[in-house]
Amino acid sequence: MLVLVGLSHHTAPVTVREQFAFPDERMPGALLSLRESGVADEAVILSTCNRVELYAVTRLEPPRAFTALREFLVNCRNYRDPLTDEFYSFSEPQSLHHLFKVACGLDSMVLGETEILGQLKKAYDLALQNGHTGARLNKAFQRAFHVAKHVRTETNIQRGSVSVGSVAVELAEKIFSRLGDREVLVVGAGDTSEKTARALLSRGARSILVSNRSHDKAVALAHELGGEAVPFDNWAAEFARVDIVLSCTSAPHFILDRARLEPLMKLRRNRPLLLIDLAVPRDIEPEVNFVENVYLYNIDNLQAIADGYLKQRQAEVARCEQIIREKAEALLVHPHSPPPSSTTRLALNPDQSPLKLM
Amino acid sequence: MIYSVFLWRNGFRRDDRINYLLLLLAFGLHTAAMLQRGFRLDRCPVHNLYEATIFVMWSIVALYLALGLWTRLRFLGAFASPGLFALGVFALMPGLDAPAGARPELSPAWTSLHAALLSLSYGALGLSAVAALMFLTQERDLKFHKLHAIFSLMPPIQRLEVVVGRLLVAGFVLLTLGLAGGVVDLARLDNASAYRGDPKIVWSVGVWLLYLGLIVMRWKFAQGGRRFALSVVGSFLFVLLTFWGTNVLSPLHHP
């Protein structure tokens, strides 16, 4: 029987999660000692910043297996503080449902995110390479990866951006034909503007200019981003060449207003300009948005878009859970059937196909 | 048109293949009907207001079908369909499909070429106005932070601006060629100078200058964005609203 014991961001604060986290190099040893203890025949440990979960195939009755696996985790990580409801435990079919939900990003802090699937594959690979998985876990994890792919293609659970940086990129893609020709000016070398600039660079933005009240910081960030530092007193002079401006200074007043921008727009020969004001208090006067070819978004506007995408994703959860239920039931009813691949889905009768573990 | 309303209401979030296929089907039937009429009359069917309207509609759809090969430009169909429907209803008004009266001795081939080129030109200018309308919608939604501007599958506004500009140039070149064909045809008449003040000729020169002005503003003075799109839509509306009137007033075109 496949059982699961774990804790996640839903049940435990980071102060607890960090103490249970497994470094990669310690996982093979931990899995070996778990199997040698006789509690589990097969096991996989998933350890990320948001969860530590132990998937095990055991011959013990679920209540005994849960207790043994919790004790193993506590002892293995040498945890001494009292625990209340931090751990959750599931046996079949809930353990399988949970694994599929995790693979699809339905249990993640950012609903529908895809990073968890890579982490799950890595955890499974590590256990597989060290010989700690067998037919049962191989089957469950292979099917989980298939379900994640199916959910991604059949639903909108992963569509759109739910972080401020990615929303800024999407906005730029709604305005400019290609991001590859665009120059970005970052005013204020803060963490949020750096993340947003990195997101734009990762989608192909041509170059980055950085301006900051402390020029040394501007030079350091420009160096990190492969860009160019611009003196803070002179950043507006770059308006003729830039297409996207990210502003995140700690100035207590507007650093850009309509009166200052209008003459600068003439130098741009009516090319569109995307202004992203990430600062609180705001750096850019809202009136600027009424200048032709200027598109101004502040942090609340970006958050509203991110929330909109999140609502779209939440509306898809029921569909995803239905798919997960069906796939989990199919696996439990026909434990030896392989997951139908996209190319063989129609051609093969899964009940008659040979078992493929990898 | 009903499907276009559905796409509008859904915020252009789904692939517009159905709208494209519906217009493709309509285009096939439209082409068959025009061919049938052309073979029956033994000439290009562009000799009265009904035929001219139908030919302009045909040109708009033909150009749309070509542009619609780029997935993101398929939504142009949703913007064009209501206008096409209105034009189609207008073309069916009684009196527009009147047989041509006694005309001056013009060459049928040159007349057909002149009318066909102009109809194609108005088709391109019409689709340019449709793309400009799409630009204005998307631009306004982006300006005022409407969520559906982000969630929709519409193309970036900069690409729409390029499409508007290219269609405008294509329409202007066809307009120039069509008018030049008309001038050559008219020059063959003995009393050609009698038609110098013909309302349709004066109007055509005005329209040509209007579009020349738009092109100069765009490429010489980098006019772009909302103002340019509004000018394109306004210019085509002017053509739509005055074409029929000047045609009726013209002794040359409506003898």
Image (cartoon, coloured by chain):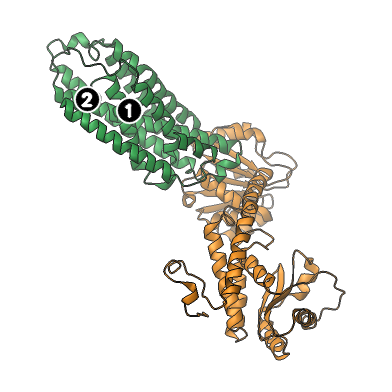
Residue A326: name its quadrant: bottom right
Pointers 2 and 1 in contact (C-beta within 8 Å): no
Residue A258 seen in the current view: yes
The answer for which chain carries disc 2 is: B
Residue wearing tag 2? B114
Residue A129: name its quadrant: bottom right
| Chain drawn in green | B
Residue for point 20% across, 27% down: B113
Residue nearest the viewer, comparing B145 with A327 = A327
Residue B213 seen in the current view: no
**Amino acid type, mark 2:** His
Residue nearest the viewer, comparing A97 with B239 = A97
A157 displayed left or right of B7: right
Would you place residue B43 above or below residue A301 in this image? above
| Chain drawn in orange | A
Q: Secondary structure at mark 2?
A: helix
Q: Secondary structure at mark 1?
A: helix
- Give how far across and how far down residue B125 sits, in percent: 36, 30
Q: Label 1 crowding class (10 Å Cα cut-off): few <14, some 14-19, many 20+?
A: many
Question: How many marks overall?
Answer: 2
Would you place residue B214 above or below residue B98 in this image? below
- Give how far across and how far down residue A40 sits, in percent: 69, 85
Residue wearing tag 1? B122
Instruction: Return the mark for residue B160.
Output: none
